């Protein structure tokens, strides 16, 4: 009996898949570490604002600046995670199919499809809650303080407000991109 002839570049494709999967997992870890760092920063700021030393709630005006940076990093990792998943699911899947190698892939599975669509939305809501609620709360807590009696604090408050809006836009764009690439993947799969 003749053995099935496999394209010699199969091993290269397999290596690329493993590399992409490894990077995807690392980016998930990095995204989660960024969120943990931010939660720690929020806790520290709250401790400084309301602790025994009591620096004052004005210190909380730093949170929207930190949340802006965190939102950009989280959105970037989240988008890239989606692109890596798409690479594994589409480009390498086509290569395997062309070589008559049928390997089940999580990224293309029905199990993933049933869960991932809602998971993308839940992730976006969670990211917004973790990143934006403390930043918005810092603005609310500072409305009644010296914000309107100090022109510098007023400028910081306005800039912080703008940064919160931009942070939301970054998170929303990442959510929209992930949802679109996810939906495209399963629309293409249905058409095959």
Image (tube, rainbow, N blue to C red):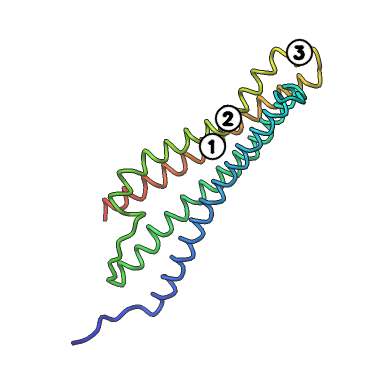
Quarter containing the C terminus? bottom left
**Distance from label 3 to label 1 (Cα)?**
30 Å
Q: Nearer the viewer, residue 73 or 97?
A: 73
Secondary structure type for disc 3: loop
The residue positioned 63% from the left and 35% from the top of the image is 67
Q: Nearer the viewer, residue 44 or 164?
A: 44
Q: Which mark is residue 180?
A: none
Identify residue for label 2: 132
| Residue bearing the label numbered 3 | 148
Choose mark 1 or mark 2, whichever is in front: 2
Mark 3 in CB contact with mark 2 (< 8 angstroms): no
Q: Quadrant of the N terminus?
A: bottom left
Above or below 143: residue 38? below
In-front residue for pair 9/123: 123
Q: Secondary structure at mark 2?
A: helix
Res 74 quadrant in image:
top right
How crowded pointer 1 is (Cα within 10 Å; few <14, some 14-19, many 20+) is rated as many
Q: Secondary structure at mark 1?
A: helix
Check disc 3: other Cα within 10 Å, few if <14, some if 14-19, many if 20+: some
Disc 1 target residue: 171
Residue sitting at x 71%, y 25%: 51
**Residue 14 lies in what quarter of the image?**
bottom left
| Residues marked 1 and 2 touching at CB (< 8 Å) | yes
Q: Position of residue 183 (x, y in %)?
A: 36, 44
Q: Position of residue 8 (x, y in %)?
A: 39, 80
Alpha carbons under labels 1 and 2: distance apart: 10 Å
Q: Residue at x 53, y 51 (%)?
A: 29
- Considering only vertical position in the picture, is 147 above or below 21? above
Relative to residue 115, is residue 94 depicted above or below? Answer: below
Of label 3 and label 1, which has the lower sequence position?
Answer: 3
Q: Residue furthest front?
A: 52
């Amino acid at each position: 009996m003749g053995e099935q002839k496999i394209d010699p570049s199969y091993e290269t494709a397999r290596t690329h898949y493993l590399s992409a999967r490894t990077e995807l997992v690392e980016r998930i870890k990095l995204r989660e570490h960024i969120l943990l760092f931010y939660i720690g920063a929020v806790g520290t700021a709250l401790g400084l604002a309301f602790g025994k030393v009591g620096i004052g709630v004005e210190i909380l005006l730093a949170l929207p600046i930190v949340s802006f940076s965190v939102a950009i990093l989280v959105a970037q990792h989240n988008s890239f995670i989606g692109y890596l998943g798409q690479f594994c699911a589409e480009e390498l899947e086509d290569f395997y199919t062309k070589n008559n190698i049928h390997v089940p892939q999580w990224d293309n599975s029905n199990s993933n499809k049933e869960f991932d669509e809602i998971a993308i939305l839940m992730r976006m809501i969670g990211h917004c809650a973790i990143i934006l609620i403390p930043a918005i709360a810092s603005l609310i807590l500072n409305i009644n303080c010296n914000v309107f009696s100090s022109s510098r604090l007023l400028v910081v408050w306005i800039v912080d407000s703008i940064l919160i809006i931009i942070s939301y836009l970054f998170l929303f764009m990442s959510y929209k991109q992930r949802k679109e690439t996810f939906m495209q993947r399963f629309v293409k799969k249905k058409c095959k």
